[in-house]
Image (cartoon, grey):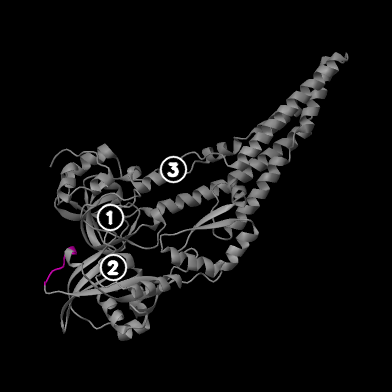
Amino acid sequence: MGEPQQLELAAAAALPVADALSRLGSSDGGLSTAEAHRRLAVYGPNVLLSHGVSALSVLVRQLRSYLLLLLLVAAVVSAVVGDRTEAGIIGGIMAMSVGLSFLNEYRSEKAVEALHAQIRHLAFVDRDGKPAELAVTEIVPGDVVHLRVGDVVPADLRLLAAHALECDESVLTGEAQASAKTAEATAPGESPLDLGSCAFMGTVVRGGDGRGLVIRTGSKTAFGAIALRLGERQGQTSFQQGLQAFSRLLATVTVLLAGSIFVINAGLGRSLLQSALFALAIAVGLTPQLLPAIVTVSLATGARRLARRQVIVKRLVCIEDLGNVEVLFTDKTGTLTEGRISFTQAVDCQGNVDEHVLTLGFACSDVTGNELDRALYAAPIAAENGKLGWPTLDRLPFDHERQLASVLVDMPQGRLLVAKGAPEGVLARSANVSGEAQATLDRLFASGARVVAVASRPLTTERLSRDDERGLSLEGFLCFSDPAKPDVQESLARLDRLGITVKIVTGDNGQVAAHLCRQVA
């Protein structure tokens, strides 16, 4: 076991398993307890950026205002010239404004801190060649972690073994569809999160099982990088910038006007003391004492209304920006649609309902599989007519490179390879794609259906390989629906009345997205 090297996750994804283990100074049986303790001292605990709340930091944030500084000067001047009542009123207004903002934001910060505290959990890690349940804070680069359905991935991992493994990466990507994983080396995709041979910290295992080599921990993970950005001091909103600019302008005008009045009075022969007192009185009179209180009360009212809708407002000033939104980018699945996929029908290449296509679709499905498989099993017509229980001899799980999954089933007529997946992936491997089949597929997409293509091929082998997924015979299509939410049309109409333009961002077929747009417009 050699000394570990620094390794980027994308580089680890492209390495064979043996090379990744060697680079991290680890082995298939994981680290020894002694080595793990040594690395823990080097790399630190596997924790994200602390989200502890400091009352002082929240209070200081409320005091960073030119307007409050102007009011403070006005209060001091009022006290100096003997107008203690005026000074007390200004001081009271300042205290109310700062106190109200502090209480609202401190409560929000504490609520967010409580949410972050809930992500602590245990994980099975290979130590001294055998699995042991450890706190995720003790995980270090080079550890080998076991993944099971329902587990939260505790660090950024290079997968060593994956058996029908799927991870819900919506916390990072926003995609509702689980991502299929493989232990085979994969080249990085267009996105830094498009790594099929890696599992990311904070994502959830939705299906299958596997083992992974820890590459990055804590704030060095993709999830940790997001936490770091959230912990950075936020820039000023346009509302804050405008208020600061107004405060600076008001302060400049007040100083210039008070100074001019003092000079004029002094030039007219008035006493310097009387001139100064009069100029200071003018300066205090120009100060808008109630403005901070009015702004704070207005924003706090908005925060309370949002809180009743279970929305946490960390910064009161963000409410004004929410009201200034002009363009809203939204996901489609689960946001505009219900996010509950249901099976509708199985059709042949001519568009006719065909139970044989349904039967083949069942043969290549798993009740613990992805959303489409579970929707197929949940459909009453599918349960009655499609499930024949053919023995499965071998299986090639879905991955994003092939865009399909395959099984080898033992039918009464002989062994048959059944492939099911994205139409573009299946059609590219089929030998009999007619113009009529393409027209049927286009009609289904235009109707808004989510489509899965089904193809087959007789085989005599006992094991499947990717080379077998060629020369397939296209059988037909499985159709699924994900209807729009009942209130989405009303919501979009309200956004339109408010002058907000809505843009849909989706990875679905363009015709499916266009159909939904026409449906909810």
**Magenta part of the protein: which range?**
461-466
Residue 269 location, x and y as percent? 88, 13
Residue found farthest to the bottom: 384
**Crowd around label 3: few <14 · some 14–19 · many ≥20 (10 Å):** few
Point out the tag, 1 or 2, that comes first from the N-terminus: 1
Q: Is residue 349 above or below residue 64?
A: below
User: Residue 465 lies in magenta, yes or no?
Assistant: yes
**Crowd around label 2: few <14 · some 14–19 · many ≥20 (10 Å):** many
Q: For mark 1, give the secondary structure.
A: loop
Q: Quadrant of residue 489?
A: bottom right
Asked whether the viewer can see residue 58, the reply is yes
Q: For mark 3, give the secondary structure.
A: helix
The residue beneath circle 1 is: 196
Point out the tag, 1 or 3, that comes first from the N-terminus: 1
Q: Quadrant of the N terminus?
A: top left
Asked if residue 198 lies left or right of residue 64, the reply is left
The residue beneath circle 3 is: 229
Q: Residue at x 53, y 54 (%)?
A: 312
Asked whether the viewer can see residue 32, the reply is no
Point out the tag, 2 or 3, that comes first from the N-terminus: 3
Instruction: Give amino acid for label 3.
Output: Arg
Instruction: Give amino acid for label 1.
Output: Gly
Asked if residue 309 lies left or right of residue 285, the reply is left
Q: Quadrant of the C terminus?
A: bottom right
